[in-house]
Image (cartoon, helix red, strand yellow):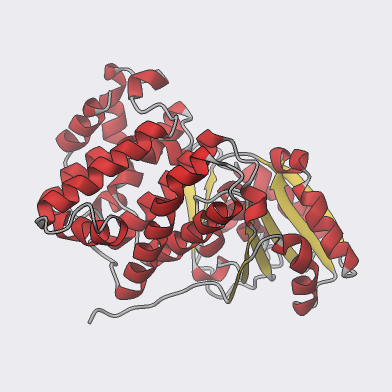
Amino acid sequence: MIGIEFYTNGHIISETDSMRQKLGALAKQYCATSAIIITDAGISQLGYDDIAQRSLQDAGVQVVIFNEVVADPPIEVVNNAIELARANQCDLVIGLGGGSSIDTAKIVALYPNDFESVDDILDLDLSDFKKLPLFAIPTTAGTGAEATFVSVITAKDGSKKAIYTPKILPDVAILDATLTLKLPQHITAATALDAMVHCIEAYTSRTKKNPISDAMAAKGLQMLWNNFERVLEQGDDLEARAEMLLGSTLAGIAFVNSSVAAVHGLSYPLSINFHIPHGHANALVMCPVFTFNLPEAASMYAELARVVMPTQISNMTDLVAAERFIEQLKKFLEVSGLKYRLSELEIKEQDIPDLADIVINTYARLIATNPRDMTLGDVTAIYKEIL
């Protein structure tokens, strides 16, 4: 058996209304006296930060709120959050929202260490750093950030930078499906497809595939798959929302201990250059990438197909089962309400060479984990297929 090092949260709560009912008590378990809630303006408008604040204050914890997080958070925003936490001597950090808010909170939790700006720690070994208690409360079922030990932020030059260390793994993840009820359909769909990609790429990783991640990925995919159309058709179905949220967390646990691969490699340039949300970008490229991978990954896709659609692929060969699996993913994209051609998103054929070049030269690490080798020509052909 391969050697395995596996990390996950020390405490995961999956329960309706758990933020309101349990956040304050959990904070006191960590002896918190002053907490910072890190979120974005949209979450504040929904009043979710107020609910969290009241729970904490009822437990005797002082609270400050930082609600200036934006998508793909710039280093300047993260630095501002750190300044607020330091000024108030916060001893608990709470990320409330999507992946950007939780990723910001992960870095803020490192603020007691001696650094002035996030720029100063980007290339450091953080294994000896101190970390404040860190809670993550996701409001989307997609990124899995509440269960991962990576934080992706945007440098001053516009490039993506990642801090990747088990040191920033949240101590507590609170999965409260009531916080996902107000998600618009397009965000529900995009984040759910993102989480499915996390499961599938974790399961088929060439470099870090392991039995624990496999189990998490298969179960997470099953929960997401079985409830995807249900939450699109009936957004207030709390049971389905809860299943999706837990499935997304399992996906996060799986991929951070395994890896993601070429779907993410091809999606990142779409997000950076054309501001397509990450989950939507993954959904755009997932099926052509999986089809490309069939010569090397058909048996693994077939294994997942037998988990999520056993009756539909009974007695089929691995290749046919894998093809049916990808066809169903295409149907999910088609019913999602998302645009699924690059041309619909103002991407032109002349943009493709530059996009492909970025994939090969900037995201080679994600191509390396893909189950099948991928060349510049292969990437170009995949982009053209969905133009």
- Picture coordinates of residue 181, whole percent (x, y): 63, 46
In the rendered image, the vertical position of residue 253 relative to residue 290, given as above or below: below
- Picture coordinates of residue 383, whole percent (x, y): 25, 30
Q: Which one is nearer the viewer's eye here, 226 or 279?
A: 226
Residue drawn at 43 percent across, 58 percent down: 223
- Tell me the quadrant of the picture where the N terminus can be found: bottom left
- Tell me the quadrant of the picture where the C terminus can be found: top left
Residue drawn at 39 percent across, 61 percent down: 255
In the rendered image, the vertical position of residue 213 relative to residue 321, given as above or below: below
Residue 335 occupies quadrant = top left
Q: Which one is nearer the viewer's eye here, 164 or 138?
A: 138
- Say whether residue 326 is left or right of residue 39: left
Q: Which one is nearer the viewer's eye here, 372 or 196?
A: 196
Residue found at the very far front of the displayed protein: 311
Residue 374 seen in the current view: no
Residue drawn at 54 percent across, 42 percent down: 155
In the rendered image, the vertical position of residue 191 relative to residue 302, given as above or below: above
- The number of numbered badges drawn on the structure is 0
Q: Which one is nearer the viewer's eye here, 150 or 194?
A: 194
- Picture coordinates of residue 184, whole percent (x, y): 59, 35
- Say whether residue 347 is left or right of residue 287: right
In the rendered image, the vertical position of residue 39 relative to residue 7, given as above or below: above
Residue drawn at 31 percent across, 21 percent down: 351
- Picture coordinates of residue 40, whole percent (x, y): 69, 43
Residue 271 occupies quadrant = top left
Residue 28 seen in the current view: yes
Residue 91 occupies quadrant = bottom right
